[in-house]
Amino acid sequence: MEYITFILIGLIGGTVSGLMGIGGGTVIIPLLLYLSGIDIKAATAMSMVHIVFASISGTIFNYYQKTIIFKYSLYFGLSSMLFSFLGGYLTKYIPDPTIKIMYLTALTISFILLLLRSRITSHKINPSRSDLYKIIPIGAVAGFMAGILGIGGGFLFVPALLFFMGLPMNIATGTSLGAIIFTSIPGLAGKLLSVDFNILFGITVGVGGIGGARLGTYLKRKINPAATRIIFILFFVVVFIRVIIDI
């Protein structure tokens, strides 16, 4: 029964990952906390296992759908790798309430950025030099927070790609998934060294996430980018309220 629960959690999180490019961790973690009863540190670690599976699967699908700019993914990913590992490893030293507050902070930052970007008007294809300078610090911050929280980095990558780079939502989400591959693997390595969790349950969540990511990226093609953005904001609101209640 436990494995069925974890597969369903992975399926739901993977769908969100593919549709919105946020790694699925933002929905996976609450589901793990409230449906399986594990603690926040184990939830972030299992979420990171799922993100590795979901981001790879989703990126492959986005490649064939031509909804990813690999140059952006590479720069974001490379700038976040070291910091993601550090965040994952330092998780054991951070009190549970602090992790939840950081999680809520990430929700708030991303939500504000999306509200500021009320209309998507620029459809860039090639990053400029100034764009690349913006990517480095954003990737570092996103990587560190992703490593601690098990959220992959897309939680900040997508708003950054929308707000700073001016990409349309469908390209931003696909590009974010590509970057999350580079963020999630070092983050998981840090978690394995510092957090006590059931890796088999994590893999089960990841397997469910593969199917979910494919479903999410398929749905993204069928949904208008503006509608996807509205769903993205509504999703943040729901998770924000749930975390507030939990704290």
Image: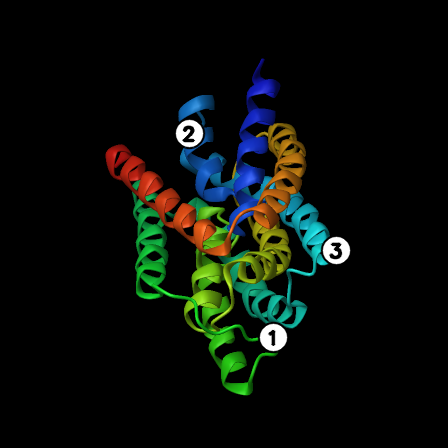
Tag 3's secondary structure?
helix
Question: Where is mark 2, residue-wise?
Answer: 33
| Amino acid marked by disc 1 | Ile
Q: Residue at 53% of width from left, 29% of height from top? A: 9
- Considering only vertical position in the picture, is 145 above or below 162? above
- Considering only vertical position in the picture, is 7 above or below 106? above
- Rendered location of residue 100, percent (x, y): 33, 43
Q: Earlier in the sequence, mark 2 or mark 1?
A: 2
CA separation in Å, label 2 and label 3: 35 Å
Label 2 packing within 10 angstroms: few (<14), some (14-19), many (20+) = some
Q: Are marks 1 and 3 in contact (CB under 8 Å)?
A: no
Tag 2's secondary structure?
helix
Question: Where is mark 1, residue-wise?
Answer: 125
The mark lying in front, picked from 2 and 3, is 3
Question: Where is mark 3, residue-wise?
Answer: 64
Q: Residue at 55% of width from left, 56% of height from top? A: 173
CA separation in Å, label 2 and label 1: 39 Å
| Amino acid marked by disc 2 | Leu
Q: Earlier in the sequence, mark 2 or mark 3?
A: 2
Q: Is residue 197 visible?
A: no
- Rendered location of residue 197, percent (x, y): 55, 32
Q: Looking at the picture, tell me which residue is in the foreground, 205 or 44.
A: 205
The C terminus - image quarter: top left
Q: Is residue 215 visible?
A: yes
